[in-house]
Amino acid sequence: MKKLVAYITTGFPDLNFTEDAALALKEAGVDTLELGVPFSDPVADGPVIEQANLYALQHGFKMQDLLDVSQTIAQQIDTLWMGYFNPFYHRGIERITSEAKERNISGFIIPDLPCEEAKPYKPIFEQNDLALIDFVAPTDSKERIATIASDARKFIYLVAYAGITGAAKSEDLHEVIDNIRAATDTDIYIGFGVNEKTAKEKAKNVDGVIVGSAFVSVLLNDNLTGSQKISALQQMAKNIKEAINS
């Protein structure tokens, strides 16, 4: 069965809601949760996730909030921390990986840390039994893909197109997927632009999908109450999980 990874921004609109949303998504069939770490310059993310990031920061998000909410969430659903390198680096890589292990986090997604720059840090993640998820882009050569895949853990994050999350773009990824398959047995999950309408098509030839902007758009909808947002998240997750496995 193909897997569904769901991204939500930690602390948006508040920490209690983050916890409720995470557990509701699990009930709806989400396999892995990406807890987003709010950052002022989320360069790989589109306007939807950027707006949620800024809201959380403006309302006082601190790294301790991530630790606190993870304490509950990661005991109940496989959880990754998704964030940019700066906050992790300033906290200290050894410290933050130790804190992640203590809270049962399974890995990190750091979009602005390419594989070449990640090499000095990977042993620290491995010592704490944490995956540092590798990205493959449509522009990567066969040789670079082989390098990236050589020590990939958990899954490879296949970027569906060059650009930012949430955009309505598509590219022919057959050759890229073939190159990844030739280099590793690690699962391939596709992200960027995955939603209820596109999930079935994007999931072809890969092992899972990563959905972020579509879920966060629900959280940004001020016409919905908190309970309505939870219900909408669950319905969207169920629809996507059904679509990718039909």
Image (cartoon, rainbow, N blue to C red):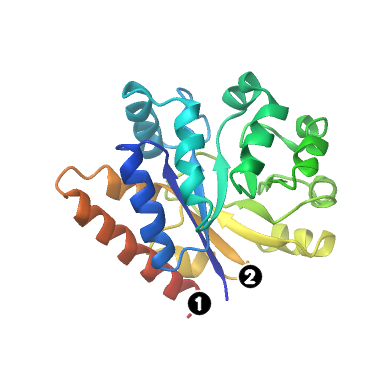
Instruction: Kindly identify the amino acid type of the residue bearing the numbered disc 1.
Output: Asn
Vertical arrangement, residue 60 with respect to residue 240, above or below = above
Give the class, few, some or many, for how many residues have Cα within 10 Å of label 2's Cα (few <14, many ≥20).
some
Say whether disc 1 or disc 2 marks the residue closer to the N-terminus. Answer: 2
Per the model, the C-alpha gap separating discs 1 and 2 is: 12 Å
Residue at 44% in and 32% down: 65
Give the class, few, some or many, for how many residues have Cα within 10 Å of label 1's Cα (few <14, many ≥20).
some
> Which residue, given by chain and number where applicable, does mark 2 sit on?
205
Find numbered disc 1 in the image and state the secondary structure of the residue it sits on. loop
Find numbered disc 2 in the image and state the secondary structure of the residue it sits on. loop
Please provide percent x and percent y for residue 33: 50, 53
Comparing 63 with 206, the one in front is 63
Vertical arrangement, residue 192 with respect to residue 208, above or below = above
Nearest-to-viewer mark from 1 and 2: 1
> Which residue, given by chain and number where applicable, does mark 1 sit on?
245
Please provide percent x and percent y for residue 91: 62, 22
Please provide percent x and percent y for residue 62: 45, 25
* Residue 197 in which image quadrant: bottom left
Vertical arrangement, residue 246 with respect to residue 209, above or below = below
Residue at 79% in and 38% down: 122
128 sits left or right of 28 in the view = right
89 sits left or right of 217 in the view = right
Is residue 55 visible to the viewer in this orientation of the structure? yes
Q: Quarter holding the N terminus?
A: bottom right
Please provide percent x and percent y for residue 58: 33, 22
Comparing 159 with 71, the one in front is 71
